[in-house]
Structure formats: C-alpha cells, structure tokens
Image: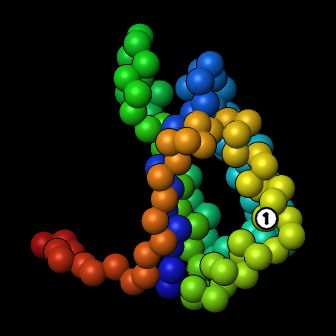
C-alpha cells in the first residue's frame, strides 16, 4: 500500500467554513469522479475542527488528506491520467498551493498498537 499524505491550508481570504465546504462538497467529489481518481483505493479528508479556530488566523493547517494506492505504479498512473490536470487546476481555488506539503509513503512501521 502507498499513501499520499498532504497537509493543506486554505487560500487567503477564504473563511474556514467556505474552505471546508468547498473541499468536502466540490473537490472531494471531483477527485473521485475522474479517471485519475479511479486509481485511488481510498480517499480521506481530515478536516480541522471549526471549534479549533480562534478569532485571529493562527496560520496553522486546515486539514490533512490521504489518498491510498495499491502500489507506486498505481500512484504514478493516477498522476499520468489526462484528467489529473483538472484536479490539479482546482487546487488554487481553495488551497494556498505555496504551503501545500505532501509526502508519498509505503507500508507504515507500527511501534505500538494498543495495550
């Protein structure tokens, strides 16, 4: 299993509510509707709790997304599809793409699993 994990931050001028709504209701469905998205085994959005935001923007990340792939070949096929460009073009509509941080990892090393 291969995972793409991204730390994401909303674009300037977008409220947390607008950001989370767009990410959940537009971008997520866009990803899974594409041929590129057909290579994704699992797509997760981890939204920062709205109650965690204060009156001032604290500059923290607004969420984490994970996309799971069967193999590195499937990940590469995902980004090679022509419609991947449509997904990528959607990012600046709601993300601060300059602060997008991501990593592609393989099977996790589990140090402690329950007691």
Question: Quick one: 73 or 28, which is closer to the camera?
Answer: 73
Q: Position of residue 97 (x, y in %)?
A: 60, 43
Residue 73, quarter of picture: bottom right
Q: Secondary structure at mark 1?
A: helix
The answer to whether residue 6 is visible is yes
User: Looking at the rendering, in which quadrant would you find the C terminus?
Assistant: bottom left
Q: Position of residue 67 (x, y in %)?
A: 58, 67
> How packed is label 1: few (under 14 Cα within 10 Å), some, or many (20 or more)?
some
Question: Quick one: 96 or 61, which is closer to the camera?
Answer: 96
x 61%, y 30%: residue: 11
- Quick check: 113 above or below 21? below
> Hey, which residue is sitting farthest left in the picture?
115
Q: Position of residue 54 (x, y in %)?
A: 38, 17
x 78%, y 71%: residue: 36
Q: Which residue is mark 1?
A: 84
The answer to whether residue 17 is visible is no
x 81%, y 60%: residue: 85
């Amino acid at each position: 299993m291969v995972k793409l994990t991204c730390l994401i931050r909303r674009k300037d001028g977008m409220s947390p509510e607008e950001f989370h709504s767009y990410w959940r209701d537009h971008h997520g469905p866009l990803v899974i509707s594409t041929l590129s998205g057909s290579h994704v085994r699992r797509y997760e959005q981890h939204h920062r709790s709205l109650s965690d935001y204060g009156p001032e923007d604290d500059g923290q990340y607004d969420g984490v997304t994970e996309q799971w792939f069967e193999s590195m070949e499937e990940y590469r096929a995902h980004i090679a599809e022509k419609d991947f460009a449509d997904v990528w073009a959607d990012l600046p509509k709601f993300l601060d793409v300059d602060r997008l941080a991501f990593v592609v990892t393989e099977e996790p090393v589990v140090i402690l699993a329950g007691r």
